[in-house]
Image: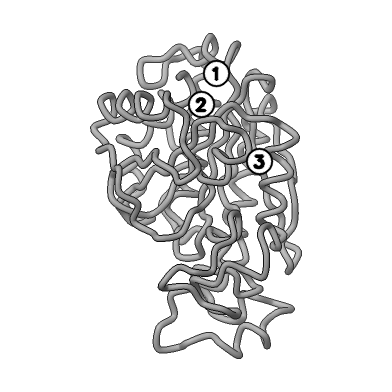
Amino acid sequence: MKYTVMPCDFDYTTNKQIIEDLIKDYPFLNVQLIGRTAVGRGIFALSLGNNKKSVVYVGSVRGSDGLSGLILLLFIERLCRAVKNNAALSSVNIRKALSYSGITVIPCLNPDGREIFLKGPIGAEGMRSFVSSFYNKNEPVWEANAMGVDISRNFIFRNEAPDAEYCAAPSFFGGDYPESEAETRAFTRFCRLKKFRQCIEICDGEDEIFYKSDEKEPEVSRMMAKIIACASGITVCTERKSSHPGIADWFIKEFRCPAFSLGINGKERELYSVYGKAEEALTLFSLL
């Protein structure tokens, strides 16, 4: 049976179309609009199971990262199929698991950044002129949102990092103050409302899971990371690749609950080949 989620250049239109198709096929899937970007694009959350004991997954935080969004959408589709058919996923009885654990997926936190990465300044729509003023055609990699803020750095504000930018830029500018951006506020407001018991960001990177934080991660985080790594074959990483804290650090600081960054190495066209290892980790994460 074919999947709705297929390898593609993941963009905002694709994200919306996949979500619409999933709702039609699985009416029990709950979809919420949790916020809008500066340009007006929607940020969506898809939920299953026990909302009182839910975990949250977030992807496509950086404009260059489309794979993580596709992985999370394929994950939620496979969960829905398992619920509908009363089938197992990664050897887990999903219907039973979701009776005591909820799963919420935010596949694309930075839809504007994704559009700009794929299409250049035209992807910024009403912010086109602003983005054009510092868009580098010779180095078109774009991580930021349409305001030129790298939202991965906008959760906990630190401007002393050696690679930090101090004004709007394709990457590395953390904004003028913490949670200044519409995307950041959408996520933090949603988390404060839902009180998720743990969080995991899926991102482009090596096949490894990172659990440490300057914010003194919960003691259980190390054990959880080892269990996930052992089951999935993903490596536990203890050395931060970036000098700047991100979503996981904010979540730990805000809630004193476990949070992780899960790096997945691959391209959008390789979705099916890289997904298998991720599924083991994502499924187990919801159970711990």
SS type, badge 2: helix
Residue sitting at x 49%, y 71%: 172
Q: Disc 2 marks which amino acid?
A: Leu
Q: Is residue 111 above or below residue 192?
A: below
Dot placed on the residue nearer the N-terminal end, 3 or 2: 3
Q: Which residue is mark 1?
A: 83
Image-quadrant location for residue 169: bottom right
Q: Which residue is mark 3?
A: 45
Residue sitting at x 33%, y 53%: 205
3D distance between C-alphas at marks 3 and 2: 15 Å
Q: Is residue 224 above or below residue 125?
A: above
Q: Nearer the viewer, mark 3 or mark 2?
A: 3
3D distance between C-alphas at marks 2 and 1: 6 Å
Pinpoint residue 75: horizontal percent, then vertical percent. Answer: 47, 35
Pinpoint residue 217: horizontal percent, then vertical percent. Answer: 46, 35
Question: How many dots with numbers?
Answer: 3
Q: For this rendering, which residue is in front, 1 or 137?
A: 137
Q: Disc 3 marks which amino acid?
A: Ala
Q: Are marks 2 and 1 in contact (CB under 8 Å)?
A: yes
Dot placed on the residue nearer the N-terminal end, 3 or 1: 3
Pinpoint residue 76: horizontal percent, then vertical percent. Answer: 53, 33
Image-quadrant location for residue 92: top left
SS type, badge 3: strand
Q: Disc 1 marks which amino acid?
A: Val
3D distance between C-alphas at marks 3 and 1: 18 Å
Image-quadrant location for residue 189: top right
Q: Mark 3: few, some, or many residues within 10 Å (few <14, many ≥20)?
A: many
Q: Mark 1: few, some, or many residues within 10 Å (few <14, many ≥20)?
A: many
Q: Which residue is mark 2?
A: 79
Q: Quadrant of the C terminus?
A: top left
22 vs 232, left or right, is right
SS type, badge 1: helix
